[in-house]
Image: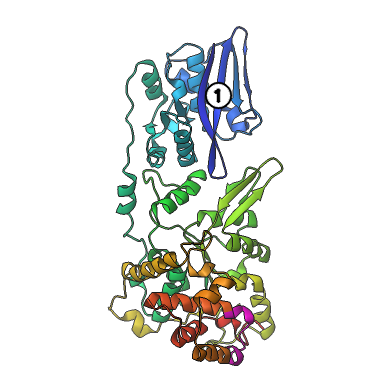
Amino acid sequence: MLKKVFGSAVFGVEATTITVEVNVDGGIGYHLVGLPDNAIKESNYRIAAALQNNGFKIPGKKITINMAPADLRKEGSAYDLTLAMGILAASKQIQAEDLERYIIMGELSLDGSLQPIKGALPIAVKAREEGFKGFILPSQNAKEAAIVDELEVYGIDNIQEVIHFFNSNIPLHQTIINTREEFEKNLDFPEHDFSDVKGQEGIKRCMEIAAAGGHNIILIGPPGAGKTMLAKRLPSILPPMTLHEALETTKIHSVVGRVKAHTGLMAQRPFRSPHHTISDVALVGGGAFPQPGEISLSHNGVLFLDELPEFKRGVLEVLRQPLEDREVTISRAKFTVTYPSSFMLVASMNPSPSGYFNDPDAPKTSSPAEMQRYLSKISGPLLDRIDIHIEVTPVPFEKLSEDRKGETSVDIRKRVTAARELQTIRFEASKTVHYNAQMNTKQIRKHCVLDEASKQLLKTAMERLNLSARAYDRILKVSRTIADLEGIEEVNGSHISEAIQYRSLDREGWLG
């Protein structure tokens, strides 16, 4: 007897429905075809033990299983439950008339219990698109899949529950989530808060500007000055994610199995901080069977690169294209996958190998040649894509020991959100530009018109501080954001002079 049951495979951040055809007839043997990987080929041992321990068995007949489309490679252990239900139905051990109306996925343990799977959210989205009635999957992934409305989602703990559902009409418990309520519940509780940071008012202001305009930022300062502490708090002042952004972000994390059990939708913006020994494939994504890298996992959030010159130069160079295009395309001979990667880059670095360049109290341990070698690890084209450079100085003891609490992240976020709303209105006609950091040259000329005094100020600064040509557009973008934070239509001299301060690395004596 032939029986069809449906599973799903994830490529990139999209799912493809897999039809599992199980045919049981006279003879003997177990044949699994359709480009399965080793994890799927080994599934017959797990299925045999799970069925045996629950009062069923793999029949001693010829079983042929085809996973269609047959030319698409299938991988992972998530098809165990799909295959097991197909075998039970095709061998008439259970009645399963409605089997074809459901997507069924799950990894089996030998006692019949289920292990979580990856990519539950994209699979649920595809199931709804293709008109399936429901999605049966392990209970650990149920909340994540239940984000998708108009699809019945059943989280189960044991294969027995599915067998009784189809064979005896014993209902399963449906997981229902109010997506909007779940999303809004977690918006105003950031894990890290700016009120924890003592002193550093100038750097907090800088962070606020970076968040308001979506500007990439680099923090330069000695060890212990608070660079990492400040960077970790940046997501807490970014505007709240929209429901669309939250779904997009959750989808990417779902593909790599990083969505925490029982959380469902991700409401907080992601913060990723890879170690400096990371490879370019781990950062950008890829591998024999492509997976999203760190830059895609930080989509709609922050990518923090601590000690930037310690990263291998090749790794930093692969960042350039995603920073421009806001997506990553990974090409293989048979297919191409694209992952979104619209993130804010926050980098930090010591000013010299010893960490204490420009500090009069510290012993000078780095020669000019060592300094140059250290700083030359960061290429000009990468720095070109970083709008704000700021020096972070250590916090004096008086500031560290005072009891006064700083401004909270929620208060700063209100100003950032107001500035972003102005930018949304400004760029509503554009599909590719949503905030100031994304402006092209034409838009800069249109939205950053300077009066004569401001032009003169900028000219003097560029000549006196020996600022490069690349700094010119960056200063205009940042000054536009400062004006937006103040709710002012025209960019004036005070905005320009503040923006000029945020170009430390362009000055003579830094990167010569």
Q: Amino acid at mark 1?
A: Val
Q: Nearer the viewer, residue 106 or 277?
A: 106
Can you identify the residue that label 1 sits on?
Answer: 20
Position above or below: 241 against 93 = below
The picture places residue 157, in percent across and down from the top left corner, at: 38, 30
Position above or below: 487 against 282 = below
Q: Find the residue positioned furthest to the top.
A: 26
Residue 219 showing in the rendered view: no
Residue at 41% across / 47% down in the picture?
260
Residue 331 showing in the rendered view: yes
The picture places residue 247, in percent across and down from the top left corner, at: 43, 48
Q: Let me know if residue 468 is in the magenta part.
A: yes
Magenta span: chief secondary structure: helix
The picture places residue 489, in percent across and down from the top left corner, at: 41, 77
Q: Quadrant of the C terminus?
A: bottom right
The picture places residue 356, in percent across and down from the top left corner, at: 55, 82
Magenta span of residues: 462-472
